[in-house]
Image: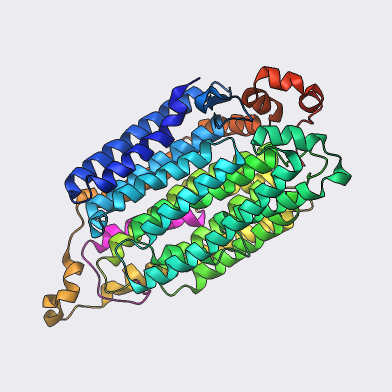
């Protein structure tokens, strides 16, 4: 077994309590250890991505117990990609939080940050549905603590709504797991695929119920209509670096849909085939519209960015709903792009808002470095809206190209193109109010000495600006190296849809041979 597979889960799990109990009163020491731990996590993630590039599915069996009886972690191209994406984003966000002083506004920021990374990485690596639930709960606890970091009535109110919604999702998750276990006798994703393939379609009612419940749970995590309403309030009221880290959390829901509904319930399964995309596709279309109109109607900067994240999740899940390798390749490219684009917008917004009395989209006297902030906002906005030359344009182009079937082309192309237009208009309006029209409003001399306006004259340090520039650099690199990146993602999609290889790797050879009908007769995953 490759023991490095467990490091992305074990490292933050060991580091978090040390930060929480030993270093909570020493912010300098906490910053050093948290940064070093995140850098090491990124290095390990790079190593795992290189190891997964061989096309094999690597399995780590805790305690050397074979699946499905023991806990397994599974590393393939997709899980390695998501862990690398998480580690890269985490380092960018952590540097911003330290440089701007956000981490010093509460004693447990770095401990919660590491627990958050543990939950995210664990969700991407687990090969068991119950442990996916466990890591979701770790995410919920850590994200709630980060959500209310630094306090405030609005933050606490949004945090309570966020927790209630996610606790309801967790309850449905438990119901789904209980139903699955009653139907199949297992919760290992690979073993479920074997067992579900044996169940005749007319006897698979309970499995279909469980599949629908899981889809609802994952839809909550992914902020899919009609359960997306928690996201705008949560992201708009969270500290900006926390909202930037949350950009990867919605992708956990999208990843879970891809993983579980491709391996266990996906195409070729007689009892559940076509169940997910039946309502996932129309819900994603409506999610695009909700995000676009939210951006157009927003009166504050943070909700505007939050609604743009909702719209980007709709675009991503439209591609996921097709459940074909080509559409999945487009979805993965857009997933990487939208994660960095959303995070970059929140980081830039933090630089701007901290130098204004509020985040309301109304003309106010220009802040110091107005041109620099305008340039950063413009670059992040065109990336999120899908305008060239950054990767958003290529991501949406890949999605449009992959979804050209007669039954869906009108809906997909209309929703994405119209949504992009409304998003462009919304961001253009916001940029005009924040940076262009503000230059025409002079600040009265007496107000220059008002303590409430001193932040307007505080110049951003290079370390405060560097994370936003780094995120924009990643978006530019995604565009410049789109060819080789897309090639890697095509291989990732092919491996994801190779159900038999996944099952053979996770289950011991003797277990596969013990159920020859299940493993050999398992239908190949084909496009819709």
Q: Which residues are magenta?
A: 359-386
Residue 521: x %, y % from top left:
82, 27
Residue 20: x %, y % from top left:
28, 48
Can residue 372 be found in the magenta stretch? yes
Can residue 465 be found in the magenta stretch? no
Q: Is residue 80 left or right of residue 432?
A: right
Q: Quadrant of the C terminus?
A: top right
Image-quadrant location for residue 525: top right
**Residue pictured at 46% horizontal, 63% vertical:** 306
Residue 75: x %, y % from top left:
53, 29
Q: How has the structure been colored for display?
A: rainbow
**Residue pictured at 29% horizontal, 73% vertical:** 438
Image-quadrant location for residue 107: bottom left
**Residue pictured at 49% horizontal, 43% vertical:** 336
Q: Is residue 289 visible?
A: yes
Q: Is residue 437 left or right of residue 341?
A: left
């Amino acid at each position: 077994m490759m023991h490095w597979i467990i490091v992305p889960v074990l490292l933050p799990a060991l580091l978090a309590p040390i930060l929480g109990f030993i270093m909570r009163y020493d912010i300098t020491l906490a910053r050093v250890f948290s940064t070093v731990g995140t850098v090491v996590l990124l290095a390990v993630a790079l190593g795992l991505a290189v190891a997964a590039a061989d096309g094999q599915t690597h399995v780590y069996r805790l305690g050397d117990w074979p699946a499905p009886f023991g806990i397994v972690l599974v590393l393939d191209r997709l899980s390695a990609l998501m862990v690398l994406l998480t580690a890269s984003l985490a380092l960018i966000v952590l540097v911003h939080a330290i440089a701007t002083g956000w981490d010093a506004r509460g004693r447990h920021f770095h401990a919660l940050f590491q627990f958050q990374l543990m939950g995210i990485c664990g969700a991407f690596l687990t090969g068991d549905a119950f442990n996916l639930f466990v890591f979701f709960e770790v995410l919920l606890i850590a994200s709630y603590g980060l959500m209310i970091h630094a306090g405030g009535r609005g933050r606490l109110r949004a945090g309570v709504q966020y927790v209630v919604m996610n606790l309801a999702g967790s309850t449905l998750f438990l119901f789904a797991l209980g139903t699955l276990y009653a139907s199949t006798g297992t919760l290992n994703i690979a073993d479920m695929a074997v067992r579900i393939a044996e169940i005749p379609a007319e006897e698979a009612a309970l499995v279909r119920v469980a599949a629908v419940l899981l889809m609802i749970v994952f839809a909550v995590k992914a902020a899919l209509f009609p359960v997306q309403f928690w996201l705008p309030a949560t992201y708009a009221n969270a500290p900006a670096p926390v909202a930037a880290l949350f950009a990867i959390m919605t992708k956990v829901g999208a990843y879970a849909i891809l993983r579980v509904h491709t391996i266990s319930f996906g195409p070729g399964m007689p009892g559940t085939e076509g169940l997910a995309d039946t309502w996932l596709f129309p819900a994603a279309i409506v999610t695009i519209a909700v995000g676009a109109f939210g951006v157009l109607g927003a009166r504050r900067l943070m909700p505007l960015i939050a609604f743009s994240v909702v719209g980007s999740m709709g675009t991503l899940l439209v591609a996921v709903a097709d459940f074909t390798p080509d559409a999945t390749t487009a979805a993965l490219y857009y997933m990487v792009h939208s994660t960095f684009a959303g995070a970059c917008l929140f980081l830039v917004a933090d630089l701007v808002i901290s130098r204004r009395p509020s985040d309301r989209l109304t003309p106010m006297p220009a802040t110091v470095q107005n041109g620099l902030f305008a340039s950063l906002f413009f670059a992040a906005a065109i990336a999120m809206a899908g305008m060239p030359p950054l990767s958003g344009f290529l991501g949406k182009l890949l999605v449009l190209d992959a979804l050209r079937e007669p039954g869906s082309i009108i809906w997909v192309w209309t929703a994405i193109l119209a949504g992009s237009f409304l998003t462009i208009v919304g961001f253009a309006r916001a940029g005009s109010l924040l940076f262009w029209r503000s230059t025409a409003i002079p600040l009265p001399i007496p107000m220059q000495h008002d303590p409430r306006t001193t932040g307007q004259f505080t110049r951003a340090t290079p370390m405060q600006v560097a994370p936003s520039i780094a995120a924009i650099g990643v978006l530019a690199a995604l565009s410049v190296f789109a060819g080789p990146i897309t090639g890697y993602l095509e291989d990732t999609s092919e491996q994801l849809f190779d159900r038999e290889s996944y099952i053979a790797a996770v289950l011991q050879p003797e277990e596969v041979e013990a159920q020859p009908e299940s493993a050999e007769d398992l239908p190949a995953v084909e496009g819709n």
